[in-house]
Image: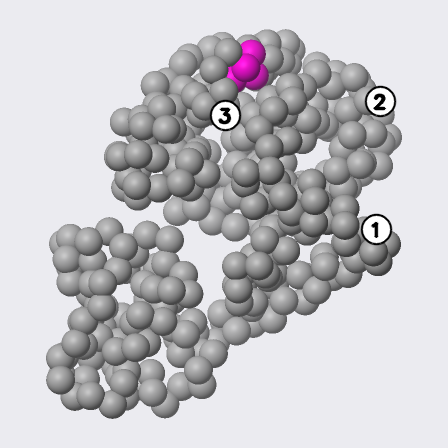
Amino acid sequence: MARSTCLRHFTRISVPKKSPSKSLDPLLVALEAAMGGLSKRKKFLVGVSGGRDSMVLLHALHALGFQKMVVCHLDHGLRGASSKLDSRLVKRTSDRMGLEIEQARARTADYAQAEKKSVELAARDLRRAFFAECAGLHRCTSILLAHHADDQVETCLFNFLRGSGAAGLGGMKPVSSLGRLKIHRPLLGVTRAEISTYQKAHRVAFREDSSNKETTYTRNKIRLQVLPAMESAVGSSFRQAILRAADILREEEEWMASLVPAVTRQLSCKELRAMHPALRSRVVLRWLRESGVVDAGLVETRRVLSLLDGSKAPAKVNLPGGLHARRRTGVIFLEGQGN
């Protein structure tokens, strides 16, 4: 969804700017290793919800001496007074650490209804737009998020249940991109239990999100019901097995992605038909994403590939955002919204 559309659904809240003690802690060791490419002299964003994971990330970064951070907090406006208390905690903590902070309040439900999206997808769109806005304001090229190893296990299993390919089964990348903004996940090698241990040892204040206990969302069902059942049946080692498999799949997916040739505005049907199916799918997916098709995935890729059937007559398929792909005279191209 266009960023300008998202930005209409939140209002900026400005706030201004102090430091915890440093100790040799396993989480700090892991975090410092993961932060290798980020200089303490360079300003970057940190996404902080007020929950345990992001509050621990913020505390640990500050303990390691990272001072040039901009805390980014978006109140999604979904939990009433509870959300406001989250915002107050994040503001108070940022002030005490002497950090810059950007806060905004979103009208997520209104945006979801207007765009005919689930609340989860709407919240994600608004977060991304907010982070991109903050990056522009502060001229930052990196943001740190608090996803950890258990989140990775949940993501891999969630994507497996959705029928994802290697990219989805590989889970979250330690570093990925959101436009020009690099998203870093330095806690991907740290477990939820290790984060909890750090939080208790350092008495890091945080807020519980009551919605994490609700089983209406598939991801919560996986965390609260599916994973405990798997652990009971086969033991806790399955989590490490999933993480190892995800690492392997990510490496293989990166290798396959490196084989994808640069795409142009039009795709040659003859060249696509000559490719191995796995490479063909990746070429089409890359073409869709680079052409601006929002959230292009397997469904959209298969729609475009359906244009490669034996018929020589012109054909077209619909795509998100009012776009469609058309085949004519042996090439596939996009039409609609400026194309």
How many neighbours does mark 1 have within 10 angstroms: few (below 14), some (14-19), or many (20 or more)?
few
Q: CA distance from mark 1 to mark 2?
A: 28 Å
Q: CA distance from mark 2 to mark 3?
A: 25 Å
- Residue at 75% x, 38% y: name it: 192
Which of the labelled discs sits on residue 201, or is there none? 2
Tell me the SS state at disc 2. Answer: helix
Q: CA distance from mark 1 to mark 3?
A: 38 Å
Give the quarter of the figure containing the C terminus. bottom left
Q: Disc 1 or 2, which lies upstream in sequence? A: 2
- Residue at 31% x, 28% y: name it: 110
Which of the labelled discs sits on residue 55, or is there none? none
Answer left or right for 202 relative to 123. Answer: right
Tell me the SS state at disc 1. Answer: helix
Whether residue 32 is in magenta: the answer is no
Q: Position of residue 195 (x, y in %)?
A: 76, 33
Which of the labelled discs sits on residue 72, or is there none? 3
The kind of residue on which mark 2 rests is Ala
The kind of residue on which mark 1 rests is Ser
